[in-house]
Structures are given as structure tokens and as C-alpha cells.
Image: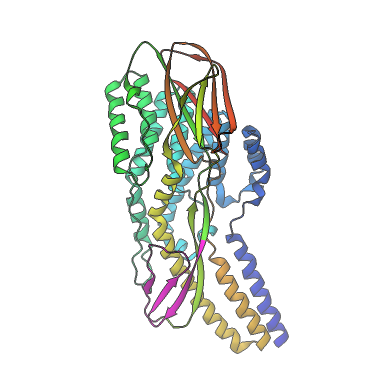
Amino acid sequence: MKKWLLLYNIAVAVFILNSCASVITRTTHFRTVDSLIEERDFFSAAKELEAGKNRYYQAKDRVLYYLDVGMLYHYAGDYQKSNEFLTEAEYAIEDLFTKSVSRAAVSLLLNDNVLEYSGEDYEDIYINIFKALNFLMLDEFDKAFVEIRRINDKLNVLEDKYGNLAKSYQLTEEAKVDIKPGTNRYHNSILGRYLSMLIYRTEGEMDAARIDYNYIVDGWQQQSHIYNFAKPEISSHLNTNNKAKVNFISFTGRAPLKRAYERRITTFENHLIVSGNEPTEFADIIIWPSLDKDLHFKFSIPFLQKRESQISRVRVYVDDNIITELSKIEDINKVATETFNVKAPIIYIKSVIRTVAKGLIAEQTKQRVRSQSSELGGFLFRVFADVAVDISESADLRIARYFPGEALISEIELEPGIYDFRVAYYNKYGSIVFEDRYDSYEVKYSGLNLIRSFCLN
């Protein structure tokens, strides 16, 4: 009988560990796609993801699939295809967030890795930035305007969005702690306003263009925690003369990745303490009535880590003569972190409640097994149960892979005609990393002469 109990306990533990494997984020299988991106073969990279959708993504990762493929098609210059995928991503994000409110009780019990990925807020915002850019490249200005308005709509409701979600999580009487979001300090997308200003100017609506310019100036002042770099000189963009304006927008680097840091829970009578090597702004002492003392659990939560870019300078050459240097207008890494911080407190408290709940159930189960199994069988089950609880609280590290890290702009004035443009990307040592060429480009007096370039290094 003891032998069968031993085998049963081991089988249960192995099942738990196999189940927990699904909550770990893996990305090593993207090497083939990343190699194509290094070669700037973005079309093949997009096709590879489409053909291998089920290899690269699970069903719960459909938002990531749409985002990644949509961005790769943007870089490949297939703007229509890019918009198709980015639109699917936007629809899925909206649908999943709506469901998350109605399924709050379930999501409070499950690790976020098990749930469908509903997108980061910065991803949802930049969907519309890049859809707007796609429409501009397709000369569909009215549709570009719609996307820019969507950006402002999303930013206006960001904090309320998570406030409503947090209320739906107030389902446990054990933990005496409020679940509430952080404060949204990002209300104005400068890059979105800049694109809007260019469109209004091109269409001759100068008063509306000046309003956008004023929003840019105000946004820079009111959001200095994000726009903590020199503001590009764009007042001349509103000047008119007999020359044609050529606008350059460049994207460099990559948006942040998610990393995990570990927190430890120690229980005391009627409360618990959360500790770790990394300081946080979250609660360290949480009241939890009827909690047993001397229990120890651990969990991990995600944070955004900036990916450093090789690019330190971007210059534009016209017919091999240096004309202008691009200036940074948006730090997408900072926007990503700022918007992530709105929901970070919710992720933290959910993780604490879930970890303690699982840990208490595991402790009760271990006590029953201890009284019914052999000493070896009970010991093995207790070890596996502890490991299973720890693994099941792995941080959800899913995030879109191909958004850029920074946006830069510049504008020059030329006589209408045909020109050869080069956009050169330099590293900090002054060496050219990459050159984007636009030969025989026709500069027109009317319309928007917009040259979009990028180097993801």
C-alpha cells in the first residue's frame, strides 16, 4: 500500500510540474526570425511568423502574433498588410480587456501567464501611431486622423480603465489591502500631436496645426518625467514660403523587454511581510487575519527593462551633402514604463494574494499527505509541492518584440525637384551602423513629403 501511495504522490507532483511549465515565458525559438531582421529582410520575417504561427505563438498569445507580424510588415513597407494585423491586435486587446473585468474572480486565482495576453498599454497606443503612419504613407489622411484621435481617447481613460478593473478584484476578505492602480502621468502623445500637426499643415488648416504645436509645447512642460530631453525646434514647421518642406521621421533601437524580480513572503500572526533585493513602491506589510506564522513563499513580478541602442546620432544627406541632424521627439521606452506603472500595483497585489492562497492550500495538502503516506513519499510530495507553487508564480514576461525604442524627426526646405537622400545612423564612436537610401525621390511643393526610416540596432 505504501508503495502505491509513493507512486501516486510522485505522479501528482510530476503532473503539477508539467502544468506549471506552461506559465514560463520562452523566447529562444525566435532566433530564425531575429536573424532575418538582422539582415533587414522584414518581409521574410513576417512571412516566417505567419507560416509558423503555431510554432511561435500559443492560442493565448494571439495579440502578440498580430502585433509582431503587423510591425514587421510596417518595416517591410507593406502598409496595407501592416494595418490589417495591427487592427486585429487592437480589436483583440479591447475584447480581452472587456472580458478581464467580467472574469476577475478567475484571473485573481490564475497566473497571468495562463491567461490570454491582452497587451501592454504602450503597445495599444503605438498601434494607432503606426497605423496613422501607414495611412500617411498610403496618402489616406482622413484615416490617419482617426488613428491619432484614438490615441488621445485611450490616454484619457487609462487610469479609470484600471480603476474599474481593480474594483472587480475586491473579492477576498482575507487580505486587508486595497487593490488600486497607479497614477497615470501620461496624457499627451507628443509624437501623435506632431503627426497631427503635419497633416493639418499639409491640408492648409494652419490654426489647427498651431493648436497641435501648442499641445506639443505644453506636453513637454507637463510631462518632463517622460520628455526629459531637449525639445526639437519645430516652430519653423509652421512657416510658409515658396519652398517645399521635407519631413523625416526615424525610429531607432527596440522597445523594452520584460524581466522578473523575485519577492519573498514571510507570514506572521495576522499579517505578512514582503521582502526582496530590489526596492519597490508597493506595500511591504499586509494585514491578513487568521494567518498562520512561520510560512515562507516566493513569487516573481515583471518590470520593463530598457534595451540599449547602438545609435547615438542620425544625419540626413541630400545629394551627398549633409543637411540636417535628426532630434529625438519620443522615448518609447519611457512611455512604455510610465504606462506600465499604472497597472503595476495591481499585478503586485494580485501576485501576493494568489501566492499566499496557493501556499496555504499546499500546506494543508502536505499535512494530509504527511499523515497518510510513507515518510519518503510524503517528503517527496512536500518538496514537489513547494517547487510547484514557486514555479506557478513565475512572472508573465510576454511583450511585443518589434516596436522601436525612440522616434526622431527633422524638417528641411528644398526647391521642388528630384533628390537622392541618405539617412545615416552613427554609433557613439562616430562609425556608420546603417544607411537608408532614397534615390530619385521627388520632392513636391504640395502634399506631405514624408520620409520614414528606421534602424532597430
Front residue of 330/171: it is: 330
Residue 270 magenta-drawn? yes
Q: Residue at x 41, y 57 (%)?
A: 344
Residue 33 magenta-drawn? no
Q: Residue at x 67, y 40 (%)?
A: 35
Tell me, yes or no, if residue 94 can be seen here: no
Of the 4 image quadrants, the one containing the C terminus is top right
The range drawn in magenta is 261-290
Q: Residue 42 location, x and y as percent?
A: 62, 34
Q: Residue 78 location, x and y as percent?
A: 57, 28
Front residue of 369/308: it is: 308
Left or right for 99, reference 425? left
Tell me, yes or no, if residue 197 can be seen here: yes
Of the 4 image quadrants, the one containing the N terminus is bottom right
Question: Residue reaching furthest right?
Answer: 3
Front residue of 73/327: it is: 327
Q: Residue 450 location, x and y as percent?
A: 46, 23
Q: Residue at x 62, y 78 (%)?
A: 383
Front residue of 451/409: it is: 409
